[in-house]
Structures are given as C-alpha cells and as structure tokens.
Amino acid sequence: MIEQLTKFIDSLKTKSNLPNFDEASVKQAIVLPILHFLEWNIFDTEEVKPEFTIENKRVDYCLRLNDANKVFVEVKGAGAFLESHEEQLLDYAFRQGIRLAALTNGITWSLYLPMKEVDWRARKFYTIDIVQQEPEVAVDKFIKLLSKENVRSGDAIQKAEYMYKDRLKKVKIEETLPDAWEKIVTEMDPLLIDLLAETTEKLCGYKPEIDDVKEFLANQKIQILTPEKPFSPKVEKKVDIRRKKGERAGRVSLQELVGAGLIRDGQTLFFYHTGQTFKDEKVTVLASMNKIKYERDGEIYSLSELAKILLQKHCGKRDDHQVAGPLYWQTYDGRLLNDLNEQIRAHRGDRK
C-alpha cells in the first residue's frame, strides 16, 4: 500500500495539466485511485457508494463498512476554492452522524470532524497537499486517516481527534506567547533579569548593573506594544517612520510595521482571501529582509510573490499581473497587513 501510493502521488506531481483537471477528471484520475490504494473496493458501490443521496442532495462518495456510513468524500475541480463548499458538506455529514469527512480538489484534501460541536469553520483538523508536501508525509496521513483498515478499527477517528486537539493547542500557544513575553518584559521578571545579566557577563566578561538590564528591557518593550497602542511617544522617539528621501510614496516595509509595534519580527501571518483565513498557509515575518518565510517549503518570498502563488493554488487565479501582497496576509487576531500599512501612511502623512 505505502509503496504504491507513494509512487502514484509522485507521478501526479509531474502532470503539468493537473491544475486544469475538472471535477470528473479529479474523481477518475486522482480520488478513485487513491481510495483504491487505501484498500477501499472502488468497484463495489455498496462500499464506495457514488452520488450518495441526502434529502435530495448528493455527496460524491460515501465510504461504507458493514452497511454503515463511515466517511463522506466531496470532490471539486482542481481549481476550486474548497472553503466555499465546507459548510454544505459539514451540514450533510452532521445530520447523517458522519464522524469523518474529506473535501478535495484532487490536490488539496481538507479533513474534518463533522460531529464537533463548534463553529463549522473550526472542524477542519488537517490538510493533505499532494503537491506541497513530501509524498511520504501525504501518504502517512492518507493511511492513518482514510485507509479502510484504520477506518474499520476506529484508529482513524482516534488519530483525527488527537490531531484536532494538537491543532487547537498550537493555535492557543501561538496566540498566548506574545502576551506572555510582554508580561515578562513589562513586569521585569527577576529570572529574566538575572539570566540576561549572567549571559551578558559570559559573552563580554562584564556583568551589567541591575538598573542597566531593566533599562534595556524597558526599551525592548517598545518592540512588542499591543495593537491598541501602536503610536506611543516612545515608539516615535525610538523609530522614525517618516518616509525617507527617495523612498517610494505609499510603500510600507515590514520593518516599519515592527518598529511601530503593529507586528513582531518572527511572528506568524496567515494567507487570507475573500473572507477566508487559511490557517494551514502560514509564513514567518523576516522584517530585516522585508520578506516572509513559507512554512511549507522553508523558502523566502516577498508578500506579493507568495500571495500570487497561493491565489493560483487555492483560487485558480492565473495572470501575469503583480498582486498587492498586504491585501492577502493577516495576523492571528484578524488584522490585515494592508490595514496596518494604512495606519503607517496616515501617521507619516502620505498623500492618497
């Protein structure tokens, strides 16, 4: 199973026309072969039931065992924007008591726990991407979460529940870390003061006075101001965000946003489009380079470069025109970079 599925996914990456597959092609050339490699009997319509009917509506495939409905699989064309189809699939699955569901355009497979009593947007626990992920990673998740044997034994649901809880934990930690760091710096935690003084002594041979360490930490606090205080007098004194001579009017760098306390160097941003935040499409801010690092491949891009790639991947948008990168990146608390840029522009008096 592993070897066959790995070779198959590897072969998909070489198909230059893969992004152009319509729904029927995705079903025939991608979905059914993957289900076959996962040991579902695709020739038995009682096991892999096509066009499963629910109150005059249909789901593309219902995976069944011992006459019991186990998994819903909804398929769209390769260029489809999956998030716009989530609510309908999850509503059908919830009403049928389906505990595991997949929504795919062949390239991306979004996996859900439909019975979770949370907002439907929060029921996705993992995304398999056969183009972006290494084949071994994709295959491992396919087998653990969708193979016939693991669905039969219940291991698929158990693994899905673990991944769901782990995802919630990571999001909570990511949201809380900035507050924890600000609390430590603001309250001058004694352990931090001692650690900083001792490390300084090890590096240069001289141990700073406690007051010097406190003054240093007080200055560092400027870099982690909360969004409610983006332009305090201290920030303006520390960082001059006025446009420099020769600098293009209206352009705002990531370093300016960091200096104004609107974002942090090294923080995570998420791809955003048409009201949807793609939590699986994460980047890290590299302010000194005015770039971002894409979590999936570890490569460095400009905001616009990666936005253009992801627009093509998730929305099928293909053209030679540049995109306005800040419109497509969002902080964890829902602030668009473009809106933060406007605060900078307003403060420095840019003409519109």
Image: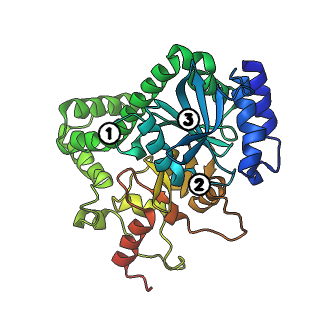
Q: SS of the residue at dot 3?
A: strand
Task: Identify the amino acid type marked 3.
Answer: Phe
Q: Position of residue 89 (x, y in %)?
A: 51, 44
- Characterize the local packing of mark 1: few (<14), some (14-19) or many (20 or more) Cα atoms within 10 angstroms: few
Residue at left 71%, top 49%?
23
* Discs 1/3, front: 3
What residue occupies the far front of the structure in this picture? 56
Residue receiving disc 1: 177
**Mark closer to the chain start, 1 or 3:** 3
Query: Does 89 sit above or below residue 142?
Result: below
Q: Is mark 2 on a helix, strand or loop?
A: loop
Front position in the image: 101 or 222: 101
Say which residue appears at 56% left-offset and 41% top-offset: 53
Q: In this view, does 284 lie to the left or right of 339?
A: right
The quadrant of the picture occupied by the C terminus is: bottom left
Kindly identify which numbered label has been placed on residue 72: 3
What amino acid is labelled 2 in the image?
A: Phe
Label 1 close to label 3 by CB (< 8 Å): no
Question: Disc 2 marks which residue?
Answer: 81
- Compare marks 2 and 3 and give the one earlier in the sequence: 3
Say if 21 sits above or below 100 in the image.
below
Place of residue 83 in the rendered image (x, y in percent of width and height, measured from the top left):
52, 51
